[in-house]
Amino acid sequence: MKVNSGYFRFFAIGLASVWLALFVFFPNLLVVITSLLTRDPSATVSLPFNLNSYWRTLDVLYLDVLWNSIKMAALATISCLLIGFPFAMAIVSLPKRWQTIALFFMIVPFWTNSLVRTYAIQFILGNQGIINKSLLALGLIDTPLQLLYTPFAVILGLCYILIPFMVLPLYSALEKLDPRLHFAARDLGASAFHRFIKITLPLTSPGIVAGCLMVLLPAMGMFYISDLLGGAKNLLLGNVIKTQFLNTRDWPFGSAFSVMLMMLLGVMLWLYYRASRFTNKQGGIHDSNF
């Protein structure tokens, strides 16, 4: 039985390693190599190796797009956090059976393609959409509001698509929170606000960082949200990458932007690691007090 278990473990780890190598490591390695090559109209890319594509990303025009992309993604991340944290706390406060049901209903929209759901938001926010028609019928406005093709529409679309990615890590972190810490703090006279600031926030920081990581980076790359809801006027970094690969056929430049996203991912993973270490230290201190 032990031999069979050892073979199964070897097979499972080997299969996972091959899968990651073929579909994660090598594709990303190709992107890095492509970013160092030279654009060739006849062959897409060619030698020699150089850093010209990375220098081009420092152009004022692209830095402005990068800043706008970070700003839009950050606003969407903060909005998801402000909505998702109370929602995750509400789920955790439910009985176990109802927690499962609540999580199920939150995940149900994933069964529908995100592009279809984006078109639904476009229909709701349009000049002839549900919101404007309702406000006009109630006499609250005289002319339709310009909700579509605005930064608000882009941020709303990003929040709607990515909110589950914020809620799930927060729910996981809150579920593991020891309730004895809150009981002890309450017995010592701490208010609900202080319990939240001193206990809940520090000990759920890995979930917060993980949720922000899972929202921020995808938000910067969702070019179709910007195209459909922003009218391509509020560009994200994904729009630039898509344009370079599909329209201008400048693969080295598009790859350089992709590498920048991977570097940003590395920074976020480092922050997550630091937050996890901090929480583990705090958890050890609290456990020793009990």
Image (cartoon, rainbow, N blue to C red):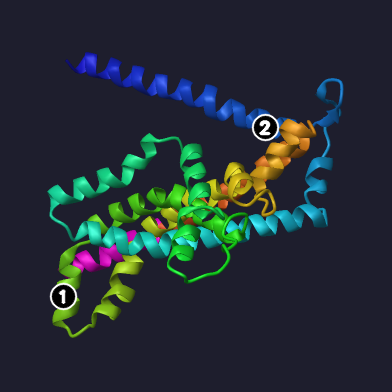
Instruction: Give the dominant element type of the magenta stretch: helix, strand or loop.
Output: helix
Q: Position of residue 189 (x, y in %)?
A: 18, 85
Residue 274, percent across and down?
A: 45, 58
Q: Nearer the viewer, residue 77 or 29?
A: 77
Question: Which class describes the residues within 10 Å of circle 1: few (<14), some (14-19), or many (20+)?
Answer: few
Mark 2, other Cα within 10 Å: few <14 / some 14–19 / many ≥20: some
Q: What residue does disc 1 label?
A: 184
Question: How many angstroms separate mark 1 from mark 2 (CA)?
Answer: 52 Å
Residue at the location (51% across, 51% down)? 157
Q: Is residue 281 magenta?
A: yes
- Residue identifier under label 2: 31
Residue 13 in the figure: left or right of residue 186 = right
Residue at the location (58% across, 55% down)? 148
Numbered range of the magenta stretch: 276-290
The residue nearer to you, when weighing 18 against 135, is: 135
- Please say if 88 is above or below 140: above
The vertical placement of 124 against 288, above or below, is: above
Residue 136 placement (x, y as % from top left): 49, 64
Q: Residue at x 46, y 47 (%)?
A: 161
Secondary structure under badge 1? Answer: helix
